[in-house]
Image: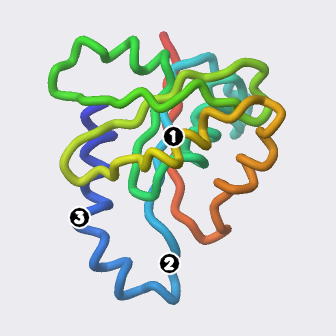
């Protein structure tokens, strides 16, 4: 997990000036979504709940931010060097239950605005409009991290 935090901080501090100079070629900031769940590896493809949830968390994460699911939060909650903020139980596309979602906090990472936290708490009936609101443009840099227990 500290690796993910370093990646997020790196992209927000070191790469920001580079991306600012290349705005005509690169749009947005890196977004990271992390979930601990089952994955299926078949040929060159990766499938499963773990992949889907990590991908959906990354899609709604703040630009430059790292969102994690409850399974990740439970796995690292005793780590005093990692701070997290509970955001909401979020309805995610193709997931039939609400996912407790957390944002990693710390220097170099964005703070999720209260208005966005309220939007993330919207019920299932409003899920489609929420997904449309947080669908990144095709040129946005995205990162999903999927972990699977051995």
Q: Which mark is residue 117?
A: 1
Q: Nearer the viewer, residue 55 or 102?
A: 102
Residue occupying the point 56% across, 66% down: 140
Classify mark 2: residues with Cα within 10 Å, few (<14), some (14-19) or many (20+).
some
Q: Which mark is residue 13?
A: 3
Numbered-mark total: 3
Marks 3 and 1 sit apart, C-alpha to C-alpha, by 24 Å
Residue occupying the point 56% across, 39% down: 118
Position in image of residue 46 (x %, y %): 68, 33
Classify mark 1: residues with Cα within 10 Å, few (<14), some (14-19) or many (20+).
some
Position in image of residue 32 (x %, y %): 46, 45
Residue occupying the point 40% across, 19% down: 73
Quadrant of res 84 = top left
Name above or below for residue 141 compared with residue 44.
below
Marks 2 and 1 sit apart, C-alpha to C-alpha, by 27 Å
Position in image of residue 40 (x %, y %): 69, 22
Between circles 2 and 1, the one closer to the viewer is 1
Q: Which mark is residue 83?
A: none
Residue occupying the point 63% across, 30% down: 90
Disc 2 to disc 1: CB gap under 8 Å: no
Disc 3 to disc 1: CB gap under 8 Å: no
Name above or below for residue 117 compared with residue 86.
below
Marks 2 and 3 sit apart, C-alpha to C-alpha, by 16 Å
Q: Is residue 3 left or right of residue 42?
A: left
Q: Earlier in the sequence, mark 3 or mark 1?
A: 3
């Amino acid at each position: 997990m500290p690796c993910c935090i370093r990646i997020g901080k790196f992209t927000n501090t070191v790469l920001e000036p580079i991306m600012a100079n290349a705005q005509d070629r690169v749009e947005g900031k890196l977004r990271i979504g992390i979930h601990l769940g089952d994955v299926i590896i078949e040929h060159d493809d990766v499938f499963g709940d773990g992949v889907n949830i990590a991908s959906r968390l990354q899609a709604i994460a703040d630009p430059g931010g790292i969102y994690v699911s409850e399974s990740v939060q439970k796995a690292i909650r005793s780590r005093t060097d990692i701070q997290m903020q509970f955001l909401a139980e979020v309805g995610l596309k193709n997931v039939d239950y609400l996912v407790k979602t957390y944002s990693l906090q710390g220097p170099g990472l964005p703070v999720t605005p209260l208005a966005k936290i309220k939007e993330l708490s919207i019920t299932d009936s409003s899920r489609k409009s929420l997904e449309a609101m947080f669908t990144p443009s095709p040129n946005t840099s995205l990162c999903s991290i999927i972990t699977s227990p051995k």
